[in-house]
Amino acid sequence: MEYVVIFEEGENSCSAYVPDLPGCIAAGDTVEEVRTLISEAITFHIEGLREDGDVVPLPSSNSPVPIDPGMLAELSI
């Protein structure tokens, strides 16, 4: 499964969240660090949902994906 991940960059940090997995977030100093952390967070979040007997939401194909032009160059999209 592939989930949409939204990255937000501040002056001194970066963060990411997964709209289809409420509460699944990560923050760090760089986009590269946050990319690793959000991947781990998604795995941990889904494992927790399964352990609790909760439904794991399927990725939404119509999640809005805001694009910050400054992030495009950094992410090499």
Image (cartoon, rainbow, N blue to C red):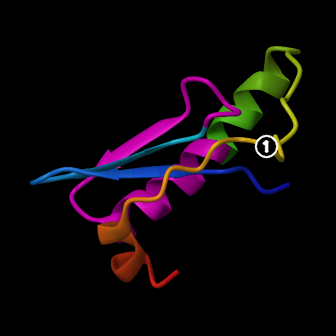
User: Which residue: 62% across, 34% down?
Assistant: 19
- The percent coordinates of residue 46 (x first, y second) are 74, 35
Locate the N terminus and report the quarter of the image it occupies: bottom right
- The percent coordinates of residue 74 (x first, y second) are 34, 78
User: Which residue: 43% across, 77% down?
Assistant: 75
User: Which residue: 88% across, 37% down?
Assistant: 58
Vertical order, 11 against 46 (above or below): below
Circle 1 residues within 10 Å: few <14, some 14–19, many ≥20: few
Part of the protein shown in magenta:
19-42
Q: Quadrant of residue 53?
A: top right
Viewer-proximal residue among 48 and 10? 10
Please name the amino acid that badge 1 sits on: Asn
Left or right side of 59 for 40: left
Q: Residue furthest left?
A: 12
Q: Disc 1 on helix, strand or loop?
A: loop
Vertical order, 40 against 73 (above or below): above
Residue identifier under label 1: 62
- The percent coordinates of residue 69 (x first, y second) are 36, 68
Left or right side of 63 for 39: left
Q: Quadrant of residue 48?
A: top right
Q: Specify whether residue 28 is painted magenta.
A: yes
- The percent coordinates of residue 29 (x first, y second) are 21, 58
